[in-house]
Image (cartoon, rainbow, N blue to C red):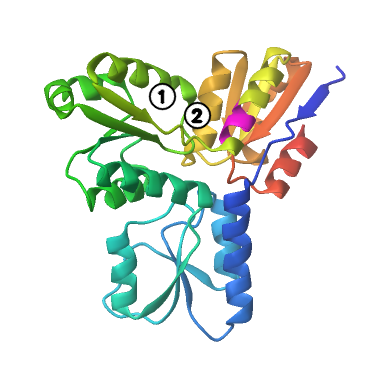
Amino acid sequence: MPKDIKLAKNAGFCYGVKRAVETAKKLKAENPDRNVFVLGELIHNTQVIRELEALGIKTLTDIPEKGEGICVIRSHGESPEVIEKIKQAGFEPVDLTCPDVKKVQQKAVELAKEGYYVVIVGKSEHPEVIGIRANAALYTDKVVVASSVDKLKNLEHDLKSHKKIGVVVQTTQRITTLTPIVEYLTSIAKELHVENTICASTSKRQAEAKELAQNSDLMIVVGSKKSANTTHLAEILKGITTTIHIENDEELKNYDDLVQKSKKISITAGASTPQEVIEKVIKSL
């Protein structure tokens, strides 16, 4: 059966990820004799991490007491305390936090300084959210991370008595997660300030994929299971059409029957999925 295969225009590396990967490679090329480390995985993609390791760029899970060389702050960002620790250990920090994430950190700090109760809409265990929270926590102890209204209902009394509530959002969140939280806070806050900090790349990617899904028998989302924006993409599309989330072309074999019987197949990919991984999937199809 002939197949109609479409690839989303906004698939693969976003600007923040591209910048982080290219700059890390450039740092190693310009400093061949120095150690180049990244604190945590530079991006949530195994292939890219392997490629960086092959170039001699190593991933650190913890900051050692003593170290030397360059230590890269990844695109998800870090807390000021962590950056200080990197310097104390003897590394030269290079900050590759995505500019959109930086913006959320700054907004959270502004709200905290202005006396708002800061609500971060996102997943509390995600590295980006940990960094945003740590930045805001330097200026207030009134910070909460919530991915649903339920989490906030437990703090209703505290939130109500605070009067001023400020909201920022993890850059890769879904608008459908933000909306009910804003509605709920509107009902209890005397003053509510919302900064919709979902990045443009995420919004565009989601909107385009939704449109493709409406005319597809099968949507294939390519990218790491650890990547928040990729997982959200798959969640959104599952509500529209049959959707599979795979990390690479190898995993496609598990869905042979599905691929065989689908006539219109569309592919999209997360912000940390390299172009060659997407191309291999298309080739396999």
Looking at the rendering, which quadrant does residue 71 occupy? bottom left
Choose between 242 and 130: the one closer to the eye. 130
Q: Compute the Cα span from label 1 to label 2.
A: 13 Å
Which residue carries the number 1 mark? 178
Mark 1 secondary-structure assignment: helix
Q: Which of pointers 1 and 2 lies earlier in the amino acid sequence?
A: 1
Query: In the rendered view, would you say 208 is above or below 42?
Result: above
Local crowd size for mark 2, using a 10 Å CA cut-off: few (<14), some (14–19), many (≥20): some
Residue 51 vs residue 179: left or right?
right
Which residue carries the number 2 mark? 232
Q: Give the range drawn in magenta.
A: 202-206
Mark 2 secondary-structure assignment: helix
Residue at the spot 55% in from the left edge and 18% down from the top edge: 238
The chief SS type of the magenta part is: helix
**Residue mark closest to the camera, 1 vs 2:** 1
Task: Give the percent coordinates (x, y) of residue 177.
Answer: 41, 23
Q: Which amino acid does label 2 sit on?
A: His
Local crowd size for mark 1, using a 10 Å CA cut-off: few (<14), some (14–19), many (≥20): many
Choose between 210 and 219: the one closer to the eye. 210
The residue at the far right in this view is 2
Residue 212 vs residue 82: left or right?
right
Residue at the spot 70% in from the left edge and 30% down from the top edge: 267
Q: Which amino acid does label 1 sit on?
A: Leu
Task: Give the percent coordinates (x, y) of residue 249.
Answer: 67, 39
